[in-house]
Amino acid sequence: MYHIPSHLSELPIYKKAIEIIILSRSISTYLNQDLSYLRPDGTEDTDIYFSGDIVQQSSSLAPEIVNAELERYSDKKHKHIASLERLTNRLYHSCKRLERCNSNGKDYLPMLRSELLKFKKLQHTWTLTL
């Protein structure tokens, strides 16, 4: 991905963010196999775009953590923290939307939402340490 100081890669919140990235990519790949087919009327399943959203949103978690940790000024730290909170919430809502899609992969989304809840708890504790 990119070079980060070794002490940051040991943070529990950073490790959880990496787990979420891996899980969301796996789920998205599984969903895409089911959602990439055209419907009988020739239209595409719009839920396929939400599967891309979970990958994009989860991939942005770790860089925001790194940016917040490396930022010197508290007001800029808080901007990264707020961005991380928005990303987490959007990712959670994208998962909920995908749970209504027509794919067997939707069965794995509660697992991702569960990991996001753990991430939110870590996020709260981590925010207090900054």
Image: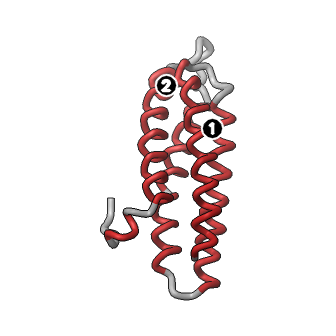
Residue at x-position 43% and y-position 51%: 18
Of residues 8 and 4, the one drawn nearer to the viewer in this rendering: 8
* SS for dot 2: loop
* Residue 17: image location, x then y, percent: 48, 53
Give amino acid for label 2: Ser
What is the quadrant of residue 120 in the picture?
bottom right
Q: Which residue is mark 2?
A: 36
* Residue 54: image location, x then y, percent: 55, 43
Give amino acid for label 1: Cys
> Dot 2 surroundings within 10 Å: few (below 14), some, or many (20 or more)?
few
What is the quadrant of residue 26 in the picture?
top left
Residue at x-position 58% and y-position 16%: 39
* SS for dot 1: helix
Of labels 1 and 2, earlier in sequence is 2
* Residue 29: image location, x then y, percent: 43, 32
- The quadrant in which the N terminus is found is bottom left
Of residues 68 and 50, the one drawn nearer to the viewer in this rendering: 68
Q: Which residue is mark 1?
A: 95
What is the quadrant of residue 109 in the picture?
top right
> Is mark 1 in CB contact (under 8 Å) with mark 2?
no
Apparent side of residue 91 relative to residue 10 in the rendered image (left or right): right
